[in-house]
């Protein structure tokens, strides 16, 4: 089972809309080495895990669960970079463009017009060239050593590509998200390298770390200084054995230590995507809004009645 908290793992920084930057970021989402692949690869490996090596299962699955939050973050970032087609000031239930104005003219000039035609100024499950994401990207060998090596190459390649995407745009929205993902990719490199070390593989000789210094990016350096590149989270409500692997000296041999935590220390609000009438995405009309309000009122009343009968909900956080 999985539980979801309506918070982001990293804040989305506000800047001007930039469809070209959004399309570059699509590679980090739906590309062969993007976040959709890491999410699916690690989760499938954990679901298909064989044997009693539970610490390795917990490590792979914990990273896979984190990758769900990365897909959420990068999708919200792409949507924000796309949001804001100019030129429409009519009522949300009018027909945009009926007066002859081209309210989505910016979409014609975008690197991927599908962002405006198919996605209503939202992210798509494609790479930067518009190729659909493919399940054939997912590698689940059924052999622990081979899976860990594959995962290590996946994270290292993803980190290189994200560093290139960083250099393609000065947009602050793109750079804040991509910098966070660069740092977390490094943490995951350390996780899979540490797991291989526990299985007798000499990291330094067999699998040298790709040599490039992302700390030259100011947004990355801030996160490195905070130490999140040496943390890994298991996101478990019950117990986890991840710490049996993710602890001690980092495989980078730089004097840093690996730290396992239940979850990140902070989370961040999810920005509300505004209605986009020019995309025929106007939100709820009064009739639908009243139905939604009635449903929420019914749910709240039902929960209160249940708590009266059974006591407070143990999963409900107490207000401070």
Image (cartoon, grey):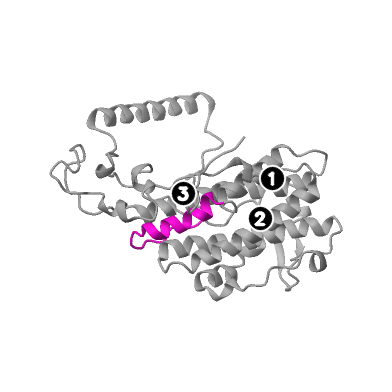
Q: Is residue 11 visible?
A: no
SS assignment at label 3: loop
From the image, tell me which residue sits under label 2. 154
Q: Nearer the viewer, residue 149 or 80?
A: 149
Q: Is residue 27 magenta?
A: yes
Q: Position of residue 128 (x, y in %)?
A: 48, 54
Q: Position of residue 18 (x, y in %)?
A: 36, 60
From the image, tell me which residue sits under label 1. 139
Of badges 1 and 3, the one in the foreground is 3
SS assignment at label 1: loop
Q: Nearer the viewer, residue 294 or 275?
A: 275
**206 up-or-down from 90: above or below:** below
Residue 300 vs residue 220: left or right? left
Q: Is residue 202 magenta?
A: no
Q: Position of residue 262 (x, y in %)?
A: 64, 51
Residue 83 vs residue 153: left or right? left
Q: Quadrant of the N terminus?
A: top right
Residue 111 vs residue 230: left or right? left
| Residue farthest toward the right in the current orientation of the protein | 200
Residue 96 occupies which quadrant of the picture? top left
The disc, 1 or 2, on the residue closer to the chain's N-terminal end is: 1
Marks 1/3 in contact by CB < 8 Å: the verdict is: no
The disc, 3 or 2, on the residue closer to the chain's N-terminal end is: 3
Q: Is residue 191 visible?
A: yes
From the image, tell me which residue sits under label 3. 130
Marks 1/2 in contact by CB < 8 Å: the verdict is: yes
Magenta residues (range): 9-31
Q: CA distance from mark 1 to mark 3?
A: 22 Å
């Amino acid at each position: 089972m999985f539980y979801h908290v309506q918070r982001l793992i990293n804040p989305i920084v506000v800047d001007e809309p930039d469809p070209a930057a959004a399309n570059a970021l699509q590679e980090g989402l739906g590309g062969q080495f993007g976040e959709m692949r890491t999410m699916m690869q690690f989760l499938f490996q954990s679901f298909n895990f064989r044997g009693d090596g539970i610490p390795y299962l917990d490590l792979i699955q914990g990273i896979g669960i984190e990758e769900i939050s990365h897909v959420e973050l990068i999708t919200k970032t792409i949507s924000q970079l796309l949001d804001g087609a100019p030129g429409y000031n009519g009522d949300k239930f009018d027909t945009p463009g009926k007066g002859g104005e081209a309210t989505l003219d910016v979409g014609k000039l975008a690197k991927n017009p599908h962002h405006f035609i198919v996605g209503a100024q939202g992210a798509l499950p494609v790479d930067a060239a518009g190729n659909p994401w493919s399940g054939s990207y997912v590698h689940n060998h059924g052999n622990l050593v081979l899976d860990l090596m594959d995962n290590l190459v996946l994270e290292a390649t993803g980190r290189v590509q994200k560093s290139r995407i960083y250099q393609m745009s000065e947009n602050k929205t793109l750079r804040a998200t991509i910098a966070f993902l660069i740092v977390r990719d490094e943490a995951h490199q350390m996780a899979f390298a540490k797991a291989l070390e526990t299985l007798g593989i000499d990291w330094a000789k067999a699998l040298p770390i790709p040599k490039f210094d992302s700390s030259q990016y100011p947004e990355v350096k801030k996160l490195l200084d905070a130490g999140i590149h040496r943390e890994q989270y298991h996101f478990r409500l019950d117990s986890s054995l991840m710490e049996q692997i993710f602890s001690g000296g980092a495989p980078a041999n730089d004097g840093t230590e690996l730290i396992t935590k239940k979850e990140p220390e902070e989370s961040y609000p999810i920005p509300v995507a505004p209605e986009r009438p020019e995309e025929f995405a106007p939100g709820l009309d009064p009739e639908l809004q009243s139905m939604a309000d009635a449903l929420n009122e019914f749910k709240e009343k039902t929960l209160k009645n249940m708590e009266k009968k059974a006591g407070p909900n143990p999963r409900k956080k107490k207000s401070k």
